[in-house]
Image (cartoon, coloured by chain):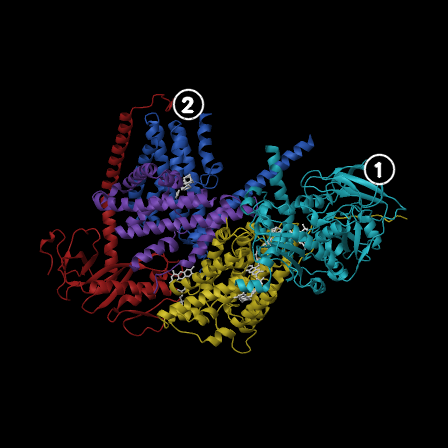
Chain colours: A blue, B red, C yellow, D cyan, E purple
Amino acid sequence: MKKNESYEEFIKGVWRDNPVFAQVLGMCPMLAVTNSAINAVAMGMATFFVLVGSSFLVSSFRNWIPKQVRISCFIIIIATFVTIADYTLLALVPKVHKELGAFIPLIVANCLILGRQEAFASRYPTRLAVMDALGMAAGFLLALFSLGAVREILGDGALFGVKLFSENFEPWVIMILPPGGFLTLGVILLFFNWIKFKKDEFLEDVAEAERSGN
Amino acid sequence: MNTRVNNETSGPSSMRLVLTLAIAGLVSGIAIIGIYESTLPTITANKARELREAVFKVLPGVGQMQALVYRDDELVVVESQGKDEPVIYGGYDESGEFVGYAIPAAGPGFQDTIAILYGYIPGDKLVVGMEVLESRETPGLGDKIYKDLEFVAEFSALSVEPEIVSVKKGTGSNPNEVDSITGATISSKAIVRIINEAHTAWATKLPAPGSEPAMQVAETASTEAGQ
Amino acid sequence: MKKRDPELLLFHAPLLRQGMTTPKAMRDVLVALAPATVASVWFFGLSAILVLGSCIGGAVAAEWLFADRKARGESLRDASGLLTGLLLGLTLPPGLPLWMAFLGGFIGIALGKVIWGGLGHNLFNPALLGRAFLLATFPIAMTTWVPTLADGGFLQIYPGNLALPFMQAQVDAMSAATPLGMLKFEQEVTPLAGLVFGNVSGSLGETSGLLLLLGGLYLWLRRDLDWRIPVSILLTVVLFSACLGFFDDARFPAPLFSVFSGGLLLGAIYMATDPVTSPVTPKGAWIFGIGTGVLVMLIRVFGGLPEGVMYAILLMNAATPLIDRYTQPRVFGRGDDPE
Amino acid sequence: MKVLRRLRRSFEHGVHPSHHKEQTGNLPIQRVPFGKNYIMPLGQHIGVPARAVVTAGERVQRGQLIAEPGGFVSTGLHSPVTGTIREIGDFRGVDGRFAPAIAIEADAFATQQVDAGTRIDWQALSLEEFIEAVQMAGIVGMGGAAFPAHVKLSVPDGVTIKHLLINGAECEPYLTTDHRLMLERPEALLEGAEIMRQKLGAEETIIGIEANKPDAIEIVRKHIQPGDPVRVVPLKVKYPQGAEKMMIKTVFDVEVPAGQLPRDVGVNVNNVGTIVAVADYFLRGVPLIERVVTVAGPGVTYPANLIVPLGTPVRDVVKFCGGLKPGTREIIMGGPMMGRPIASLDVPILKGCSGVLVFTEEQTARRKEYPCISCGRCLEACPYFLNPSRLARLSKSRMFDEMKAYNVFDCVECGCCTFACPSNIPIVQLIRTAKDDLAHRKEPEA
Amino acid sequence: MENLLWVFVSAVLVNNFVLTYFLGLCPFLGVSNSLETSARLGLATTFVMLVTAVCAWILNTYVLIHAPYLRLICFIVVIASTVQFIEMLIKKLSPALFRAMGIFLPLITTNCAILGLAIFATNRGYGFWEGIVYALGAGIGFTLALVLLAGLREEAELSSIPKLIQGTAMNLIIAGILSMAFMGFAGLFSST
Ligand SMILES: Cc1cc2nc3c(=O)[nH]c(=O)nc-3n(C[C@H](O)[C@H](O)[C@H](O)COP(=O)(O)O)c2cc1C
Ligand SMILES: Cc1cc2nc3c(=O)[nH]c(=O)nc-3n(C[C@H](O)[C@H](O)[C@H](O)COP(=O)(O)O)c2cc1C
Ligand SMILES: Cc1cc2nc3c(=O)[nH]c(=O)nc-3n(C[C@H](O)[C@H](O)[C@H](O)COP(=O)(O)O)c2cc1C
Ligand SMILES: Cc1cc2nc3c(=O)[nH]c(=O)nc-3n(C[C@H](O)[C@H](O)[C@H](O)CO)c2cc1C
Ligand code: SF4
Ligand code: SF4
Ligand code: SF4
Ligand code: SF4
Ligand code: FES
């Protein structure tokens, strides 16, 4: 049973409550760095690290942190993790760090992270909190990757820098430019709406059929 | 299970609040300093390597370099750059003979600031290399300023006096003319302008050719800089 | 035998209407554009027909695909989709690959009209939205201009047109600069006569100033456009250029050159006046026009692009809700204060 | 600018519907023969309904008072025929609702002469007596609104009327009643005007006539004695030139402030028909028992200008005009721009009804409604400078409260916006819906 | 001087914080359904940005030069506390001003546009005046984008946007279109 519960926490963040597609959180880093898959994944990993790390800490110390200063504590914890991530990336992959630029420190302001601390980690035991953070972070990573992949494939004809089409492919430059970020995410959300719409419609049809059948 | 959290009616004392924050800050500070110290060598090394690579690229034939700043009316060798103090790099060959300067410069491009580094040989008044360090120019158009090798090659022997001018592609004939890139005229002109401006700014500050600061061994203190 | 009373309707007054209807207005614009369209075929031959056709095809395809199954015929019949396609086509370079033209029409209608709820609900000009999308997506193809045809070259097709879908066009085969590009990047001024009669390189529909004005006159006579918008745009541009000329007439474009070059006339007469995306209030129309004129000159003279009409109109489209809100007409008998 | 506007002699905006007046413009006024059934609604004017003073079965003379004013903003009613009161009960009115009315059966053999027939020495009457006389005579505004005339005469202290403005614009298409009255009874018009002017204490009478009635302008001018303080002002042909605030703007270049009345700028506006009714009462002793009605429109066999006793069912009027052509789809009481469609031919002619217009399929064919394309034609049409497109849009989204900020209550429902709209949006109707909703919403709350 | 002009124009139009840097998106997408609120939020943000620019400059000049690794924490803590202090100050001094923008102040502190401003200004090595002008431009640009979007959204509410599209998806697409239109400003005042 227990195992199931934590699995639930994990999977809900990846899909049903996906922070980007379902909750529309963490938009800023999302759009700014997803002009290529590699940047998107790097950003996703950094966020992953920060989110899971701070959730773990916050949850572990949740009974010691007084309510009045909890936000300040969260921010200090998050900022610490972000700084760690920042320096690590800078040391290990300076090229990627240069591309992501100022957006790594900005993870601090990502409301997804603070929101998870406030809504979940500070209230639940460590194991659940970590599962939740893992789920959310994975969902965020997934969203970043899908956006980055779409934008890179169309915008550069490549994925992770590997050319996918013939030499003559005409890149869709807009995809790499800012408007492409807004438009692609808009269209992806539209697609999700559409799926939900169709699903609701389908469920309604089923209900209808059942009612008339009885 | 969360009922245990934060349900004290009286609330914690302010002493406890301060203490919590202080501990958090302390732990965080230690963690940050720890990561900083442990990554610092790699990061510094990375940065230095990048800089060297760039300088060597724009100044062919260079084997050593040192940072120079303009202080008290002369160019002096420095270890670390002061704030708001523009720095340039002196390039020397393996034997310590002065070759030229690598000058960083920046200015507005089509989209945002473009930062470049260019190599300059004061004796011949020639630009001998140009490398774009940072730009947000449009992929496919503006990014040709560093992707179009033909364009980059324009800067391998470019006379800066009289001022560099950019001309339509295929019409450049004089030593001070750069063929601009079709479709990215603005970005290519921006590079030219940035170099011109930087050149004007530095021209009066550079010592007469032949009297450049000599290469110093890295360990020496910079007391006897100059000459 | 007692005659039965007729079945009376309770159709509310006013019972009378003036003759104009919305589809008629759209058709009027098509008519007004006819001379410029013919001129584009004259100057660019078969390519013009292909590019215009692809745009219209893309626009109509989007309109058809996204329409309700029931309303499909209706939404096509009011001719507004057709008009969007045509106007978009007229703003494109003649040598553009056809698949891009099709995509532009499709995106213009899909992003510019359908998602807003269809005719009358969009806040941005769909044709220009399509063009802005193309320009940002394929900047090279969209800024590759071709010279007008030599005599009798009607059947010739620019090689760029025939690029395979998603593939690049062969560029550099034949290229030319537009009058504005020549001014901005090479400081060369094109003689005015070419601009007025249209024998210069540029977008399909922007080349002949004279025919565009003619169409505008027709639209004005039919009361289909708000004359304030073209008048204020053109006046602003003229004044702006004149002022710049006062400082340095060698470096800045002359007023008449400004008016007749680029897409200004096409934009001012046919696109800024799109009733849906321009302010409804008369005062708003003036502000819209002046704003467009200023932005056009700002982008042309101080910006990075040689032409700014499209962006100017789109930016003013974005400001239109605000303009409308703050220029409500003064109500009769309420003095000068609008509140 | 101002000079230019004065030269153009008009208000701003408005529309130019084709006037369709050729059908009846040249036809002299005829009397319809008396019929059998008459229905006199007690509330055929704005304000409080009248109170019946007769009972069923009673015999009444033509011109006899059958209902007295129910309050100050109310007038008397007079029997239009000699006959018998058949019933006092609820009858279907113009708006389709049932409302109290007096049904009279005409005496088939009566001569239908008016008994009274005596001239009243109006000069001897004090102002109060004069006002009461007008009220008892049942005179209401004949320009369409049917606002009791005596109320307009009761000017509050501190307000002086400088001008009597007589509204002969008749800007609604098809209608020719005022036109014919001016042509056929210019003396009555001028006599009535003089009475009103003196009683109001106004300095001058101005008769505003649209320039498409040159014959009326000429005849009225011819009858003005030199030295009389009367002036005829030809007006630009434009709808709604006859709306009183527009006419005041045209004639005096003054805007009546929103929410105020013409008297606040020193003007009293009356329709030609109203003035003639005043003359008929004071000089000939005939109260308001009949009125001139234009019967026209593509669905009428023989269009005509008719003197119709009040209370005559539309059916009788139409029958006199040769009946309805096949394909008739709609009958409007009043003008085509502001009139009301009626649901039944049994509706009676009322004091405020200047026309019975019959339309066929062609005019009433369902026009396809397109979305608003913000073309601004409605703004350019609205004489009150409202933003009808915004009002319609808000009304469609049922954002009625927001409409107050856009001055929905300044709309007079003149119909210019709907006329001008190329997308066939029923703007006036949408505005009316919103006004109704806003007006009625208070009641349940209170 | 020309440089300052370019810094300003670039921050307002060419490199608009919201439309090209994707900063401050949550207020952009969240609050911009009302014009009134947007204008006030924009005003308050501009104000906080100016304060931040000053703070960032002081920190950079006197503190971070010795301890660069504390940058993030310093920025966050200092900005948050300064804004809180100013909030109290305004509340005391001018209740009217507080009503107009006070309630937004604490919310803005957690918004990434503010932190972004401090970080960008530092990365670009802006001096004091450049920093101020940059902050002013960024704030005005933010306000401009917010107000434009609010106008568009209020108008769109009256039109019949299909149910399917309403909401964040539509807002993002409008933002994308706006961002596309702002591309017209590219290169403004950077070429001569
Ligand atoms: C989306 C887009 C991006 C552009 N990016 C750049 C750029 O990065 N650098 C540049 O110089 N011009 C850029 N341009 C400007 C145009 O290509 C401009 O026409 C060109 O600089 C003119 O050069 P030409 O006369 O050599 O064709 C861009 C234009 C567009 C539409
Ligand atoms: C290109 C163009 C320019 C015009 N310029 C003016 C003008 O500057 N002033 C003007 O009054 N009318 C101008 N008009 C004519 C107006 O449309 C006309 O005067 C106006 O519609 C009269 O309206 P009104 O009498 O209903 O007020 C212009 C028309 C066109 C097509
Ligand atoms: C849109 C509109 C049009 C009108 N047209 C006329 C008209 O053509 N002739 C007229 O006598 N009254 C017309 N009226 C009524 C006048 O505004 C005003 O009520 C009338 O002239 C006053 O005279 P009365 O009370 O004698 O009817 C119109 C009113 C409105 C709102
Ligand atoms: C005078 C006039 C100008 C128009 N201009 C445009 C235009 O520039 N672009 C466009 O897509 N549609 C234009 N239309 C058509 C129509 O308004 C457009 O399809 C709507 O914007 C779609 O809702 C125009 C219509 C008229 C009457
Ligand atoms: S709360 Fe923060 S991270 Fe979340 S959407 Fe808003 S700005 Fe972005
Ligand atoms: S009906 Fe109302 S809104 Fe329409 S034109 Fe007349 S006054 Fe204006
Ligand atoms: S006239 Fe009709 S279509 Fe034009 S703005 Fe008014 S309501 Fe809209
Ligand atoms: S963070 Fe503040 S400003 Fe942003 S959406 Fe939430 S309440 Fe609004
Ligand atoms: S404002 Fe940028 S992440 Fe919230």
* D322 displayed left or right of D183: right
Count the numbered circles shown. 2
Is residue A177 in view from this perspective? yes
Which residue sits at x=73%, y=51%? D277
Report x, y in % for residue D295: 78, 55
Residue nearest the observer in this picture, C166 or B89: B89
* B107 displayed left or right of E141: left
Residue sitting at the far front: D124
Residue nearest the observer in this picture, B46 or B29: B29
**Residue assigned mark 1:** D58
Residue nearest the observer in this picture, B83 or E154: E154
Residue sitting at the far bottom: C151
* A212 displayed left or right of D6: right
| Mark 2, other Cα within 10 Å: few <14 / some 14–19 / many ≥20 | few
Give the label on residue B1, or none: 2
| Mark 1, other Cα within 10 Å: few <14 / some 14–19 / many ≥20 | few
